[in-house]
Image (cartoon, rainbow, N blue to C red):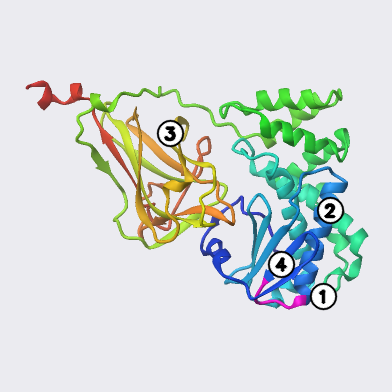
Amino acid sequence: MKRLVLLAACLGLAGQAFSAEETTPAKTYRSDHAVVSYTVISEDYARAIARTVEAARNVAVEQFGFDMPETITIKVHQGKHVRLFNDGQDRFALTVRSEADLRKPAQSGIFHLYGQCHEIGHLAMYRLIRDRSWMTTAAAEGWAHYLGSRLVDAVFEREGEGLWPDRYNYLADGTARLKEQLASARRGGTVEGAARWMELVEIVGDTGVAAIFKAWGQASVDPADPGAVLRKVLLATNDDSRLPDWWNKAEPLLVFKRPKSEFAARTVERTALTGEPMQLAHDDGRSAGKRSVAGGGHAVRFEVPGETWFLTAVEIYGSRYGYPRPPSEDFHVWLCDGDFKAIADFPFPYGKFPRGAPRRVRLDVKPTKVPSEFIICVGFNPTATKGVYVHHDKEGSGNSLVGLPGSQGRPFSQGDWLIRIQLDQPKSADPLRMAR
């Protein structure tokens, strides 16, 4: 039997599915705390989705003490694939090929009811921890899997077996399934993450995690060693003597470190440069597709002769998607060394990218010295309702990657990102100018 578990939009490559949220649904089903907008499913399924999300949302508030939105909006639309995303705040986007995709898992292979609870788990965490750059996939997905499994049990207790139109015993998809996974000798990162969070809840109780997440969300962490501050904040929120041992065990799995490069981030004023920059590019300038990278970034590797060059600008061909108003947050451009370790971080407001038609966006940076081999990485932290499509050409040179600083990055084989850079040299390094 095919098995597809719906996950949040914090992993993988996301393509056209993100743009589907712009389509105006034909029908709406409302409950006290959920609104389902839909086109390709019946009202029975819309009602079941609303009841599931509302019940899971209420349990997250009443039993676990999380700050959940008053209303969660779920948009159900037709697409080529079955996907479920969240925006980190109060919206889900569900794509199905037809209503048949909503049948019980024994027939469709898709765990929709668990998936909705999984997304509630993500919202519970994401609304409190806005900056999750330190968080591994095992941490984010493990938490959503753990809490989502608990919520399935609670929803079953409140709504019963008859909740889903295609009636089935979905209680088996909750903690019963999680316990089976935990007993397996071959459990992946998500299940290992769920195990760590389960151990934390056993120490601090159901209502204790929200306070920890809130404190972590307010903390300022060092990307090179986020664990130091996270540990200090954790122990300040609760004095249980078991927490230090839990953290020592959990940190290697849950915390992502971005070690800084040994190459110094040296900068100069623009007036010290020649003013005649050189452009470097691997792409052919023709778009063959576009991608929004969730849980990663768009990266390109470059080389220059010697170490007298300074990065002055990055140009990206792309467009913003989501709500008309850009989100009130920054995206990031990183200059990394050849090992993908960060040298410098350049934040820019989301509004730099227009919504709709793509265009080449120039991002001027403080002139920063580059090593002979380096990587430019751009991260937008996209969700279902905000992000940037970066275009790529048809044939790759092997220099385009998917990843974020601190990771190894993986090759992007579908082409080269349409990301170009400009470099300049100090006037003192120009032999022609020196001869004048």
Q: Position of residue 270 (x, y in %)?
A: 27, 28
**C-alpha separation, residue under disc 2 versus residue under disc 3:** 44 Å
Specify the segment rendered in magenta. 38-43
Q: Quadrant of the C terminus?
A: top left
Judged by depth in the image, the label closer to the viewer, 3 or 4, is 4
The residue lying at 75 percent from left, 30 percent from top is 249
Secondary structure type for disc 1: loop
Q: Which residue is mark 3?
A: 336
> Which numbered marker is on residue 210?
none
Q: Residue at x 71, y 49 (%)?
A: 123
Which residue is nearer to you in this view: 289 or 106?
A: 289
Q: Earlier in the sequence, mark 3 or mark 4?
A: 4
Q: Which mark is residue 36?
A: 4
Identify residue type, mark 4.
Answer: Val
Task: Give the amino acid at mark 2.
Answer: Asn
121 lies above or below 422: below
Whole-number angstrom distance, CA of label 3 to CA of label 4? 43 Å
Mark 2 or mark 4: whose residue is earlier in sequence: 4
Q: Report the amino acid beneath label 3.
A: Cys
Examine the rendering and report whether any part of residue 188 can be seen.
no
Q: Secondary structure at mark 4?
A: strand
26 up-or-down from 34: above or below: below
Location of residue 311 (image quadrant) = top left
Inter-mark Cα distance, 3 to 1: 51 Å
- Residue, disc 2: 58
**Horizontal and vertical percent position of residue 122:** 71, 49
Task: Indicate the quadrant containing the N terminus: top left, top right, bottom left or bottom right.
Answer: bottom right
Task: Name the spot of residue 300 as percent of width and height, x first.
Answer: 39, 44
In three-dimensional space, the C-alpha distance between marks 2 and 4, rounded to whole angstroms, equals 17 Å
Disc 4 crowd rating (10 Å Cα; few below 14, some 14-19, many 20+) is: many
Which residue sits at x=55%, y=53%? 386
Q: Position of residue 271 (x, y in %)?
A: 24, 26
